């Protein structure tokens, strides 16, 4: 048995045009031009795992490797840089397109001394701290309970005031939101949206979509089209961005749009539970949500992302820690001829599901329902590298969570 749960999306469709408009194709292209102004910007690799695809008897496996992004070992800076620029532009009543890497610090200085707050498992907070430092501003970052000290040190090295709380991720967000509300000249920068807080999460999602734009340009250069896309979800900002961008990219050509799987840890399966509930409302998960996939240990779906995914995604699935750990080892020690990918616990989650999907007989029904054949081609995103190097070695070298 795989111990993987899956459910086909049968949630009644609603009007999600407002959320989908955030992922407008031309807008995301302009945001990519904004990112190009940063000297640290470069297109991250799209790795074709040809030999793994042959081993698993499928047509192709393509993995976007975000461990190279901005030198920060994860994709997160794509979102917070554009969100902070958009926030500054709004405060100054100017178009965000007037801002770029060179003009941002001067524009930020017009706000006076400013503090950006964030809650994080590590990657998002590090990106917010990095962006604030680049702009000459302050950052205050709180990590949720159980996060490793090494990620805290990464954040502090970016110049932020940072600490680990004794709360879970969602409660840490509430705590940080209260702190920001009490601090003059400050703003909270989170990639999850709730009622009354949607602008910054929307901008962050738009920044994340640049990664998806790059991937489809890279696939086009290879003359390849994915039949399936696997996207991991925590609060769902990345998954919602990816789904929204791809659905807009294909438009009315739904028959050729990739079939999408949304992947979550079993311990933090708020999207799966929301799909299972089936009435269109979001279902929250509470408690500690213990999982090695710390970046996905989120129990409350983003309002914007759920709106996009309930109307467009095809399947919601859950995996266990051992599936992600196995994928880290497969990616870190690939078949001869395939390129190595250093993928962290959350980054490897979609691959953890794919390995089971293509090899486990107990998932035969899902393969049939999802039209998976020997010619299927899969697009995945490894959203982080070894952000916790000690745990990465324990998993890849010592077989932890086997």
Image (cartoon, rainbow, N blue to C red):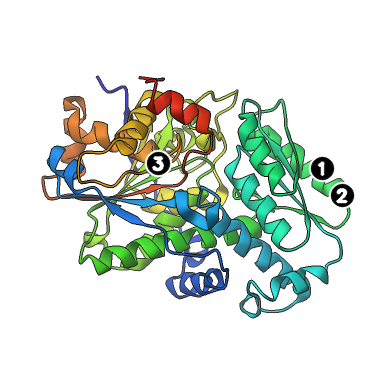
Q: Nearer the viewer, mark 3 or mark 2?
A: 3
Residue 366: x and y in percent read 22, 35
Q: Residue at x 69, y 49 (%)?
A: 158
SS at badge 3: loop
Q: Nearer the viewer, residue 378 or 368?
A: 378
Badge 3 density bin: few <14, some 14–19, many ≥20, Cα 10 Å: many
- Of residue 393 and residue 4, the one placed in the foreground of this image is 393
Using the image, tell me which numbered label, if any, was put on residue 179: 1
Residue at left offset 32%, top offset 27%: 4
The residue at the point 20 percent across, 46 percent down is 337
Q: Is residue 227 above or below residue 342?
A: below
In this rendered view, identify the residue nearer to me: 179 or 32: 32
Could you tell me which secondary element the residue under label 1 belongs to?
A: helix
- Gap between marks 3 and 2, in whole Å? 39 Å
**Drawn side of residue 171 relative to residue 19, left or right:** right
**Considering only order in the chain, which callout, 2 or 3, is on the residue closer to the N terminus?**
2
Residue 273 percent coordinates (x, y): 45, 32
Residue 93: percent from left, percent from top:
75, 77
Tag 2's secondary structure?
A: loop
| Distance between the alpha carbons at the discs numbered 1 and 2 | 6 Å
Say which residue label 3 marks: 342
Of labels 1 and 3, earlier in sequence is 1
Question: Would you say the residues marked 1 and 2 are in contact, meaning their CB atoms lie under 8 Å apart?
Answer: yes
Give the quadrant of the C terminus: top left
Crowd class of label 2 (few under 14; some 14 to 19; many from 20; radius 10 Å): few
In the rendered structure, the answer to whether residue 289 lies left or right of residue 107 reads: left
Q: Which mark is residue 238?
A: none
Q: For mark 2, what is the residue?
A: 183
Is 288 situated above or below 217? above
Residue 159 in sight here: yes
Query: What residue is drawn where x is 46% and y is 53%?
Result: 68
């Amino acid at each position: 048995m795989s111990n993987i749960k899956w459910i086909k999306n049968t949630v009644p469709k609603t009007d999600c045009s407002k959320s989908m408009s955030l992922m407008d194709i031309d807008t995301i292209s302009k945001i990519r031009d904004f990112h190009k102004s940063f000297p640290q910007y470069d297109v991250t690799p799209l790795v074709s795992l040809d030999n793994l695809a042959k081993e698993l008897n499928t047509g192709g496996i393509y993995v976007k490797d975000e461990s190279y992004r901005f030198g920060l070992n994860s994709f997160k800076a794509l979102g917070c840089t554009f969100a902070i620029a958009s926030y500054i532009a709004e405060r100054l009543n100017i178009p965000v397109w007037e801002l770029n890497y060179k003009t941002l610090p001067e524009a930020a200085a017009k706000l006076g001394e400013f503090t950006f707050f964030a809650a994080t498992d590590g990657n998002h907070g590090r990106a917010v701290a990095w962006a604030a430092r680049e702009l000459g501003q302050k950052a205050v970052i709180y990590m949720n309970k159980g996060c490793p000290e090494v990620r805290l040190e990464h954040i502090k090295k970016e110049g932020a005031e940072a600490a680990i709380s004794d709360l879970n991720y969602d409660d840490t967000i509430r705590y940080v939101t209260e702190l920001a509300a009490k601090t003059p000249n400050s703003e909270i920068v989170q990639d999850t949206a709730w009622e009354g807080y949607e602008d910054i999460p929307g901008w962050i999602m738009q920044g994340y979509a640049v990664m998806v734009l790059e991937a489809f340009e890279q696939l086009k250069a290879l003359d390849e089209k994915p039949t399936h896309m696997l996207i991991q979800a925590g609060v769902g900002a990345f998954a919602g961005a990816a789904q929204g961008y791809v659905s807009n990219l294909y438009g009315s050509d739904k028959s050729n749009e990739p079939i999408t799987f949304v992947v979550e840890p079993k311990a933090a399966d708020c999207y799966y539970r929301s799909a299972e509930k089936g009435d269109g409302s979001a279902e929250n998960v509470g408690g500690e949500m213990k999982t090695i996939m710390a970046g996905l240990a989120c129990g409350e779906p983003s309002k914007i992302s759920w709106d996009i995914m309930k109307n467009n995604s095809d399947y919601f699935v859950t995996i266990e820690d051992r599936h992600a750990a196995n994928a880290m080892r497969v990616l870190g020690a690939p078949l001869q001829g395939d390129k190595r990918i250093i993928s962290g616990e959350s980054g490897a989650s979609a691959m953890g599901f794919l390995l089971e999907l293509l090899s486990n007989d107990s998932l035969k029904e899902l393969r049939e329902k999802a039209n998976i054949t020997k010619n299927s081609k899969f697009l995945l995103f490894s959203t982080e590298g070894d952000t916790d190097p000690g745990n990465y070695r324990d998993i890849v070298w010592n077989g932890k969570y086997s």
